[in-house]
Image (cartoon, rainbow, N blue to C red):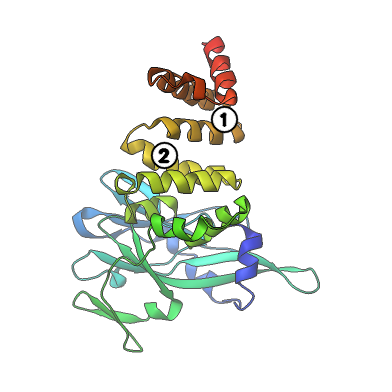
């Protein structure tokens, strides 16, 4: 998550001073094993911010592993927060960031949450305040110390809903930032586990386009790749190629430009191919 965005959202957040020492053992904790042998594990990582001693949370199922949260998100979890049916896990993700005070000095700040994870898919079903994780399972319902009851259900907003709110914004950068914030702090992989690309092909292509248009090509590619796994589509090849080109991954980009050029030609739409795609696919052809 961008630090300039995070700083704006953390003006009210105080330091959690004792948190870092408690988190230092995460990397040594064994994986939490849920339904069907799916796991959540914790990995030590090198942080770009000084003073952070935490781990990142990763979900594994059917031989595939992906991060549950964004790159600057630490996490904590324990097996007693796994539901009796092993289908739901509560985790304590922590967002870290640097905040400048009135004297221009930076200090590390953190914001703790309580999230509900599906151990079947790796979807972050819901997000709550940190105190929500203080409680216990009664059957397969989580009951907090304040008596609030959670019956696990999907609350993470859909890509179509995100698009409804973003499409009216005329500024490309603002659209991209809105989408990024709309994901809260979920990884793209976890978000797509909540809302599978197969049921959201057009929405993910559009979200990726808006992200790329706003300068967030790395994030855009995550969603493009999700759609690509469902099946190749002509416009998707162009979108992937453009993002790869801007990221200076030119060899890979040129292959996609070439595929796009070929697909458009087969469809009898060669005259509609953008000039940049023609030029860049020709470069690839010459190299081959």
Q: Position of residue 105 (x, y in %)?
A: 77, 69
* Marked residue nearer the N-terminal end (2 or 1): 2
In the figure, is residue 175 to the left or right of 155? right
The reply to whether residue 164 is visible in this rendering is yes
Residue pointed to by mark 1: 249
Q: Which mark is residue 274?
A: none
Dot 2: what SS? helix
Within 10 Å of disc 2 (Cα), the crowding (few <14, some 14-19, many 20+) is some
Dot 1: what SS? loop
Residue 72 vertical placement versus 111 (above, below): above
Within 10 Å of disc 1 (Cα), the crowding (few <14, some 14-19, many 20+) is few
What's the CA distance linking mark 2 and mark 1?
15 Å
Q: Position of residue 282 (x, y in %)?
A: 56, 15
In the figure, is residue 186 to the left or right of 247? left
Which residue is at a point 79% across and 68% down the rendered structure image? 104
Which residue is at a point 47% across and 26% down the rendered structure image? 256
Marks 2 & 1, CB-CB < 8 Å contact: no
- Quadrant of the drawing holding the N terminus: bottom right
Residue 83 vertical placement versus 3 (above, below): below
Residue 278 vertical placement versus 127 (above, below): above
Q: Position of residue 43 (x, y in %)?
A: 44, 54
Furthest residue toward right: 103
Which residue is at a point 30% across and 44% down the rendered structure image? 198
Residue pointed to by mark 2: 225
Residue 174 vertical placement versus 277 (above, below): below
Q: Position of residue 98 (x, y in %)?
A: 66, 65
């Amino acid at each position: 998550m961008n630090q300039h965005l995070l700083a704006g959202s953390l003006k009210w957040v105080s330091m959690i001073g004792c948190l870092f020492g408690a988190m230092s053992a995460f990397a040594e904790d064994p994986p939490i094993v849920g339904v069907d042998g799916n796991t959540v594990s914790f990995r030590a990582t090198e942080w770009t911010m000084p003073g952070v001693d935490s781990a990142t949370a990763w979900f594994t199922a059917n031989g595939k592993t992906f991060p549950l949260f964004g790159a600057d998100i630490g996490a904590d979890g324990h097996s007693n927060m796994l539901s009796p049916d092993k289908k739901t896990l509560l985790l304590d993700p922590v967002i870290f960031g640097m905040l400048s005070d009135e004297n221009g000095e930076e200090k590390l700040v953190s914001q703790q949450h309580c999230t509900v994870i599906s151990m079947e898919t790796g979807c972050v079903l819901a997000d709550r305040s940190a105190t929500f994780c203080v409680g216990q399972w009664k059957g397969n319902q989580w009951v907090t110390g304040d008596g609030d009851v959670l019956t696990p259900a999907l609350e993470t907003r859909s890509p179509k809903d995100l698009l409804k709110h973003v499409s009216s914004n005329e500024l490309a950068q603002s659209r991209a930032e809105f989408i990024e914030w709309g994901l809260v702090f979920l990884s793209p992989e976890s978000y797509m586990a909540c809302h599978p690309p197969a049921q959201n092909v057009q929405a993910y292509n559009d979200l990726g386009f808006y992200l790329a248009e706003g300068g967030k090509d790395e994030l855009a590619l995550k969603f493009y790749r999700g759609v690509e796994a469902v099946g190749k589509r002509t416009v998707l090849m162009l979108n992937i190629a453009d993002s790869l080109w801007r990221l200076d991954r030119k060899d890979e980009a040129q292959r996609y430009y070439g595929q796009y050029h070929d697909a458009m030609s087969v469809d009898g739409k060669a005259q509609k191919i953008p000039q940049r795609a023609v030029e860049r696919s020709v470069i690839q052809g010459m190299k081959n």
